Amino acid sequence: MTFARSIAALAAIGIVSAGVTSARAETVEEFFKGKTSTIIVSTGAGSYIAIAQTIAKKYPKFIPGTPTMIAKAMPGAGHVNATNFMYNNAPKDGTYIASIGNSIPQHEVTDGKGVRFESVKFNWIGSTGISNLMTVVMGTAGVKTIEDTKKKEILSGGTGAGSGTVLYPTILNNMLGTKFKIIIGYRSAGDIDLAMERGEVQARHGYSFGSFDRSHPDWIKSGKAVFLYQVGLSDRMGPKGVPLMIDLAQNPEQKDILRFFSRTVALGRPYLAPPGVPADRLAALRTGWTNLMKDKDFVDEMNRLNLDLFPQDWQEVTENVAALVSTPKPLIAKAMAVMERKGTVDCKVFSNPKNCSSGKKKRKKKEG
């Protein structure tokens, strides 16, 4: 062997040895140790932020390497901005996870505006869940069941056109023939409560059971109000004995449509990681999530902050998302059709007319 070939052979051996050393798999603990992990939150305030901040404090001890964790708000475009970021721009190494709106998978297959992601390709981690959404009607309205609302007009307060306060009564009006007259333009859901107290409207749709129970614990017991139905896939997240919206269906197709709308509620407050996260790190995040949801300190903190906690693991969330986005297109078309408001909305006038998105604005006659 020539000197040159000997040097080349030794160099090759050195390269191979170096390659073997550098290729030693970095453990999950080694990777996360000393790192800062980020929770991207698709809203700027409210329960999404509060839950993410609580998770950021408690989650790291269940992740090997115990990384520091922070929550960072990225609101905009109805949760779409943050979702697009997680799909296209977030690091795919396990240091970024996100809390996104439960409406995102449904938005992808209905409106689709601004969508640059595929929900089924995310690595879903789990969900903290939310209470079912209730329809509350004041006792003075004289109705006790959904059948009663097919015979008698009920004034129902609404905020924005895309909110549950408007969406659910619209769906039931179009599909089942209920007579909810939606008064749209209230600045907040809390304002609808005040309007119900004043007798200005008689009902509110899309009311989180947990929030209602904390705000008006006496309304149902005293008979001041009644629950007509609840939106969700199980009464595990709501009161027993109140029918689910899917149970109001009159035929299998209607049930499929109502289930399509109910799945978003069932998703609760879902958390995800980007596509492409290494399998061992993803497994660690998912196992850590499961352990976090059972942790007494975390559960106690969520209860102290009056935040809903109906834990779901990554498999349950993944299955729900897959079912949503695989809904047959003809059924989605029918679902979108029953979302269309047809002359049932009055626009309530406030000092800020931008709150009114439908109906004619009242004008005062000019004097003189």
Image: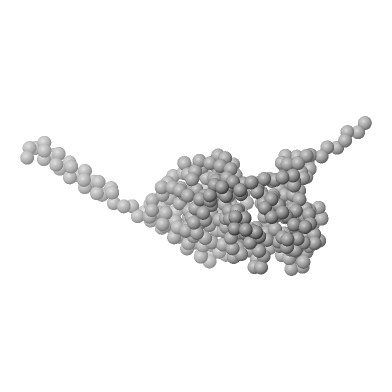
Q: Is residue 58 above or below residue 110?
A: below
Q: Residue, x 43% and y 50% (percent of image)?
A: 94
Observer-nearest of 201 and 218: 201
Q: Is residue 67 left or right of residue 172?
A: left
- The quadrant holding residue 244 is bottom right
The location of residue 280, given as percent across then percent down, is: 38, 55
- The quadrant holding residue 250 is bottom right
Q: Residue, x 55% and y 64% (percent of image)?
A: 299
- The quadrant holding residue 283 is bottom left
Extreme residue in the top direction? 368
Q: Is residue 322 left or right of residue 26?
A: right
Observer-nearest of 235 and 249: 249
The location of residue 230, given as percent across then percent down, is: 65, 60
Q: Residue, x 51% and y 54% (percent of image)?
A: 323
| Residue 199 seen in the figure | yes
Q: Residue, x 73% and y 65% (percent of image)?
A: 220
The location of residue 315, given as percent across then percent down, is: 47, 58
